[in-house]
Amino acid sequence: QVQLVESGGGLVQAGDSLKLSCAASGLHFGTYAVGWFRQAPGKEREFVAAVSWDGVRTDYADSVRGRFTISRVNAKNTAFLQMNSLKPEDTAVYYCAARRSTDVPHTPGGYDNWGQGTQVTVSS
């Protein structure tokens, strides 16, 4: 059974940094693309960043490019999202997702395994 567990969320001030982790189990992690998505209250789930199975290719939403960095350590079955220069508009529940694929999907429908999410709140 595939399980993804996010951690690292919290309450921070604008300009601060956070590093989210996504620990995976029950899958051959090194064959899965990983994406991070977020959902704010009353809004649809939106793409944040994604990384290919081998960590070579990364993609970002325009709103976070240059501030967020996605990475992975396949030997530890873990992916990360380093978030710098956080803004109040980054406040949301952040979800980790995975799909066995050589592609790097940008939409929620492109993933079939999801974590429960971790709350990130950025105060002004």
Image (cartoon, rainbow, N blue to C red):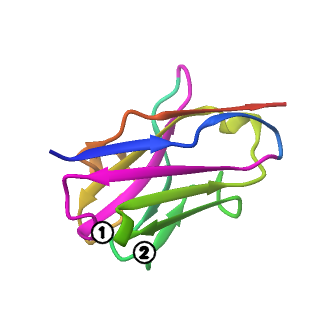
Residue in the picture at 41% in, 59% down: 78
The quadrant where residue 98 appears? bottom left
Q: Position of residue 40 (x, y in %)?
A: 56, 28
Q: Position of residue 36 (x, y in %)?
A: 46, 50
Q: Nearer the viewer, residue 51 or 29?
A: 29
What is the crowding at mark 2: few (fewer than 14 residues within 10 Å), some, or many (at least 20)?
some
Left or right, 21 with reference to 24: right
Q: Which residues are magenta?
A: 16-42
The quadrant where residue 116 appears? top left
Left or right, 73 with reference to 28: right
Q: Position of residue 86 (x, y in %)?
A: 75, 45
Left or right, 20 with reference to 16: left
Q: Is residue 102 magenta?
A: no
Q: Secondary structure at mark 2?
A: loop
In three-dimensional space, the C-alpha distance between marks 1 and 2, rounded to whole angstroms, equals 12 Å
Q: Which mark is residue 103?
A: 1
Residue in the picture at 28% in, 49% down: 111
Above or below for 9 versus 78: above
Question: Type of residue at label 1?
Answer: Asp
Q: Closer to the camera: disc 1 or disc 2?
A: 2
Q: Which residue is mark 2?
A: 55
Q: Nearer the viewer, residue 9 or 42?
A: 9
Q: Nearer the viewer, residue 75 or 89?
A: 75
Q: Position of residue 2 (x, y in %)?
A: 20, 47
Above or below for 78 versus 44: below
Above or below for 54 versus 78: below
Furthest residue toward left = 1
